[in-house]
Image: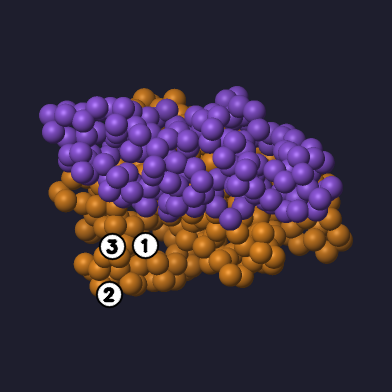
Chain colours: A purple, B orange
Amino acid sequence: MVSEEALWSALAEVMDPEVPVLSVVDLGVIRRVYTEGSSIHIDLSPTYTGCPAMDVIQKRVEEALNSFGEVVVHTVLDPPWTTDWMTATGREKLEAYGIAPPVGKATDKRSLWAVQPSVGCPRCKSQNTEILSLFGSTACKSLYQCRDCHEPFDYFKCL
Amino acid sequence: MKWDTCDPKAAYVLHLADDALILGQRLSEWCGHGPILEQDIALTNISLDLIGLARQYYQYAAELMGDGCTENDLAYFRDSRAFKNHLLVEQPNGHWGDTLARQFYYDTFHFFQLEALSASADERLGQIARKAIKECTYHAQYSAEWIIRLGDGTEESHQKIAESISRLAPFAGEFFVPSEVDAAAAAEGWGPNVASLRTVWLEKLQHILALAKLAPLDSEKPARLGGKSGLHSEYHGYILAEMQSLARAYPDATW
């Protein structure tokens, strides 16, 4: 039987279709990997409930692992996925790709009309930025602009 | 009627699902028509979150109903009378202020509804709500910010948003008048006693309206009722016609 370690390494090669620098492991959506007889079980937490990328992610996970055995993906809603589960490597990759990583912890931000965090520009590193729109090109992002280098950029918002 | 249910829990889950689906469908009508690109994207993002949430609820309702029922049967093959969404969410998009006033009423209610559902005696509803409230917080923030921007904006934006807020208020009143389904859910601890959510809702609402330099809501206005018992406005049929026609014309079609 294949080792869990080998499965995790295979999963580290499965990229998010919308943010192609992040693997599903970086993203923190893989909650558990285990084997049962000849089948492989994956607990997967969706990022956003309506995110169309989730179907693609599930398919890619199955494709990446089906050479090891029968793959069963379980969607796990609870505890809900949070940006806190994104790995440190994932955050670095995001920033290098031009997307500002989530600022601080998402925990305890579940209050109405929270104050917007201060987000650093992923290009020039200035903290002098402003929000253009709370919602961006995908469910997980907001749109910001840097007041110093004037570049607009995506911010992976806390959830 | 096919896919109607007498099971009180399934009926309650369907009521929650119908709100999310109908409002999600309404917001999707803005796709390609937003005043500027960022706002077009924002509304369609919210639409997508709501449709995702509706799927979670429909999948659960379908499991409760059994008999081979699927989420698609519930979304595409029920008629208007079977839908138990609030009248508010089926109201037309109108102008930008109408859409945002509707959204502001709903998001604020939805936040407190999900907060209560997070502690539901039903494990599955609790799981769905604990996930959804994180997304809903962003929706509520967005619509409240727009109310402030429009209310405290130009003379024209102020007058228009004041009119939208006032005209839609009776529809928001339906949130807090329990239906039989709501009452059963509250009795079993699946969902909140909706009447009790009114105080927190109104408090949040009045706070934002004051920031927006808008008149406080007249809380004595009678509510417009009907949606939760399946008696919808004329608009509802048109929404279903557009949303369901493809599935009904090609019942076994798949992507």
Tell me which amino acid carries mark 3. Phe
* Residue farthest to the right, as pictured: B155
Q: Chain of mark 2?
A: B
Secondary structure beneath dot 1 equals helix
Q: Nearer the viewer, residue A146 or B160?
A: A146
Q: Residue at the location (40% across, 67% down)? A: B243
The mark lying in front, picked from 1 and 2, is 2
Q: Residue at the location (75% across, 35% down)? A: A118
Please name the residue that numbered disc 3 is placed on: B77
The mark lying in front, picked from 2 and 3, is 2
* Residue A98 horizontal/vertical position (percent): 64, 47
Q: CA distance from mark 2 to mark 3?
A: 11 Å
Left or right, A57 with reference to A116? left
Q: Which mark is residue A8?
A: none
* Position of the N terminus of chain B by quadrant: bottom left
Tell me which amino acid carries mark 1. Ser
* Position of the C terminus of chain B by quadrant: bottom left
Tell me which amino acid carries mark 2. Ala
Q: Nearer the viewer, residue A114 or B146?
A: A114
* Residue A16 horizontal/vertical position (percent): 45, 47
Q: Residue at the location (33% across, 72% down)? A: B246
* Residue A52 horizontal/vertical position (percent): 43, 53
* Total numbered labels placed on residues in the image: 3
Q: Decide: marks 1, 2 in contact (CB < 8 A)?
A: no
